[in-house]
Image (cartoon, grey):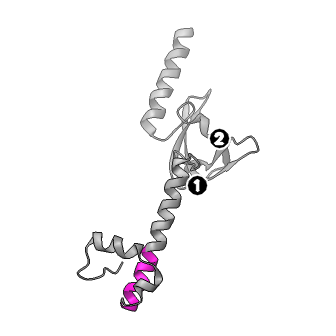
Amino acid sequence: MKRIPNVSDKELIQLLKYDIAQLQGIETDYRKEIYRLRDEVEKLQEYKEIEENKLLLTFPCKVGDIVYELDLPEYGIIVCKVIGFHYVFELTFYVNVIEGHGKGSSYEFSISEIGERVFLVKEDAENKLRELEEQDDNKI
């Protein structure tokens, strides 16, 4: 990003508030940069408003992340790569994954299963697996 020389952040913020007529005396390259920054500030304000109104969806993982699924009743851990997200009519969100770092079969799980059957950290999956194995041992 180009910086306007000898202009402080405070002064730049003031420039962003100017209307088009007030910017006519400023060099063209800098004026273009001010317009670009103004657009970015407007986008940030929109995102802030969306977030404040709780309309912004955030997911616990992103495409390309590795997640760890418990394979029950075999008591193993399946390593999966996130390949997408989708939702169904009832607004249940699903994570689409493919087994084995992208080399196996693909399927989906509900986001609500994260922390129960699917984990974002391998150690968490291993701990849950040990817990389930101990529960089974106690039943015998």
Q: Residue at x 68, y 50 (%)?
A: 86
Residue 8, quarter of picture: bottom left
Residue 9 at x, y = what percent? Answer: 29, 70
User: Residue 102's mark?
Assistant: 1
Residue 134 vs 104, above or below: the answer is above
Left or right of residue 99, residue 33 in this image:
left
Left or right of residue 15, residue 132 in this image:
right
Q: Is residue 62 visible?
A: no
Q: Is residue 49 visible?
A: yes
Residue 130 at x, y = what percent? Answer: 47, 24
Span of residues in magenta: 27-37
Which of the two discs, 2 and 1, sits closer to the camera? 2
Q: Earlier in the sequence, mark 2 or mark 1?
A: 1
Residue 45 at x, y = what percent? Answer: 48, 60
Instruction: Please state, as top left, top right, bottom left or bottom right, where the N terminus lies in the image.
Output: bottom left
Q: Which residue is mark 2?
A: 109
Q: Answer whether residue 44 is magenta in the image.
A: no
Q: Nearer the viewer, residue 122 or 47?
A: 47
Q: Secondary structure at mark 1?
A: helix
Label 1 crowd bin: few (<14), some (14–19), many (20+), radius 10 Å: some
Q: Answer whether residue 36 is magenta in the image.
A: yes
Q: Amino acid at mark 1?
A: Gly
Q: Residue at x 45, y 73 (%)?
A: 38
Magenta span: chief secondary structure: helix
Instruction: Please state, as top left, top right, bottom left or bottom right, where the C terminus lies in the image.
Output: top right
Q: Secondary structure at mark 2?
A: strand
Q: Nearer the viewer, residue 109 or 134?
A: 109
Q: Nearer the viewer, residue 14 or 117?
A: 14
Label 2 crowd bin: few (<14), some (14–19), many (20+), radius 10 Å: some
Q: Amino acid at mark 2?
A: Phe
